[in-house]
Structures are given as C-alpha cells and as structure tokens.
Amino acid sequence: MNKYNDFSNIIQTDDSFNVELEAYNISLQEYTKDDIIRILAENNDEKKIVAIINLKSIENKFEADLILSHLTGQDGRIREAVSYILSELNPSDFYLDEKSINTLLNGILDINPNVVRNLISFINKSPKLKENLIKPIVIKTNEILSDLEKYVKCDSPFFENQSKSNKNHAKNKLTFNLYWLLETISILDVNKIENLENILTKTSNFIDYTIREKTAKILSKMENKPPELLRKLKNDENIYVKNQLLC
C-alpha cells in the first residue's frame, strides 16, 4: 500500500484541487536515498513529507542529522513525519550526542501530541538514549515548573490559575509541556534521577488531574517511594490518579 494513503492525516492541503492533485502525484513517485537528501535541501514541504516517510533506512550520522534537523522549526506535517520515521526506523545510536539530545527534548515540547507520542515511542526503544536524556529532561522540567509559578498559586492545595481563566494560553501551553515531560520521565530509569521527589512534590499539587496522574505513574516506578507523597496520591480524589498506585 502506498505510504501516502497510510499517512493521509499528515499530508493535508487546504487550498485547491490542484494542490491536492500535486500532493497525490508526488506520493506516487519512487524515491532513492539520493532523491530524499536532495528534496530535504529544497523548500517543497509536500515533497519533504512524502520523501521522509518513504525512507527505508538511516545509515550514517549525516543522514541522521539531516532528518533530525527537520524535527523542529518546520511545518507541523514535516515534524510529524520525522517523528514517525524515527519511531519506525529507530536510528537511536546516531542521536546520543548533546546536540541531538537537545533537539529531541525540544521535540517533546512540540504542540502536536502525535509528534510527542512518536518521539516517546522512539526514545523508549533505546536504553542509551534514555540514559542520556535524564539530566536534560530534569533541567527542562524544572524550568517549566519555574515558568508555571508565574501563573499559579503554589501555596494552595492544588495549583490554581491566578486569573481563574481557562483561556490563559501561556499557562495551558506550559501545562501541556509538563504533561509530556512527565510522561517521558516515566519511561526513564526513575531511580537514577536525582531530586525527583522535589519535582513530584510540586506536580502532586497540580489542579489538573492528568498531571497528578503522571506524577503517580512515576512514583509507582520508584523503589524507595517517599511515604508522604505515596500516602497523598493513594488518597487522591481522582480515581485515575489512585489507580496508578494500585497496579
């Protein structure tokens, strides 16, 4: 089956029939590795999307870096295509350097949840990648929590939006980022993470139950669970939070 059909949710156009026809015609073409490298140096987003998802292998650091360079700062469909192909081909050994780790971390902060899901799936396949992500992701999580303090009351039973408005875009984006950072932390070796309790103590107070649920999920994987935190989350008012600690 043509991969264009499988990836129709990514290849979307909204202008005219001619644009749709061009995208369809692009999808019918066969792409060699040289074709793909050439296309990625051009400015045709439709071609880039189809070329990326037609990759059959990533064989060296040059190819790996070229693909990863399209994970951020690109059209959303391209970012999703990159995250998809990374999960499919799993070229993780090429991405253990600091620059690649930082790019992957920025990808985890993508506004498209499909991008983030694909990246977490990719990361979860590589013990080395997970090891190298521990320190950077803790730093980033603490940064997000620090930024959130501008919008929330940290001394309340649950973090509350100071403006009492659900339309606070900045706060909602940070909360979204925090959710996926916690989900990524949950696939790492949490027992190697220093000062994790400090993070979980803050996130356990969050008004959004999905943040508390991720907090409980991480706590469930800790060998030495902080007793007070364990008691608190086991008695959470939300069933989904409590269930993480009943498994």
Image (tube, rainbow, N blue to C red):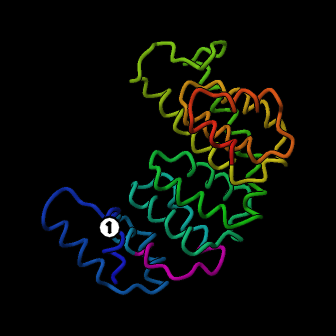
Name the spot of residue 112 as percent of width and height, x first: 44, 49
Residue at 24% in and 60% down: 13
Q: In the rendered view, does 151 fall on the left or right side of 143?
A: left
- Between 230 and 108, the residue placed more toward the observer is 230
Image spot of residue 140 (x, y percent): 68, 39
Vertical comparison of 190 with 33: above or below: above
Q: Which residue is mark 1?
A: 46
Side of 159 relative to 227 (left or right): left
Residue at 75% across / 29% down in the picture? 231
- Which contiguous range is marked in magenta? 51-63
Residue 47, picture quadrant = bottom left
Which residue does the image show at 55% across and 39% down from the upper left? Answer: 177
- Report how many numbered discs are placed on residues in the image: 1
Whether residue 55 appears in magenta in the rendering, the answer is: yes
Where on the picture, by quarter, is residue 238?
top right
Near mark 1 (Cα within 10 A), the count class, few <14, some 14-19 or many ≥20, is many
Measuring from the top left, give residue 214's x and y in whole percent. Answer: 62, 41
Where residue 131 sits: x, y (%)?
78, 57
> Callout 1: helix, strand or loop?
helix
Q: Quadrant of the N terminus?
A: bottom left
Q: Is residue 89 magenta?
A: no
Q: Amino acid at mark 1?
A: Glu
Whether 6 is drawn above or below 218: the answer is below
Identify the residue at image location x=62%, y=72%. 90
User: Depth check: 210 or 228 in front?
Assistant: 228
In the displayed structure, would residue 228 be above or below residue 15?
Answer: above
In the image, farthest residue toward the right: 224
Indicate the quadrant where residue 212 lies. top right
Instruction: Please tell me whether residue 157 is drawn above or below residue 210 in the rendered image.
Output: above
Closest to the observer, 241 or 123: 241
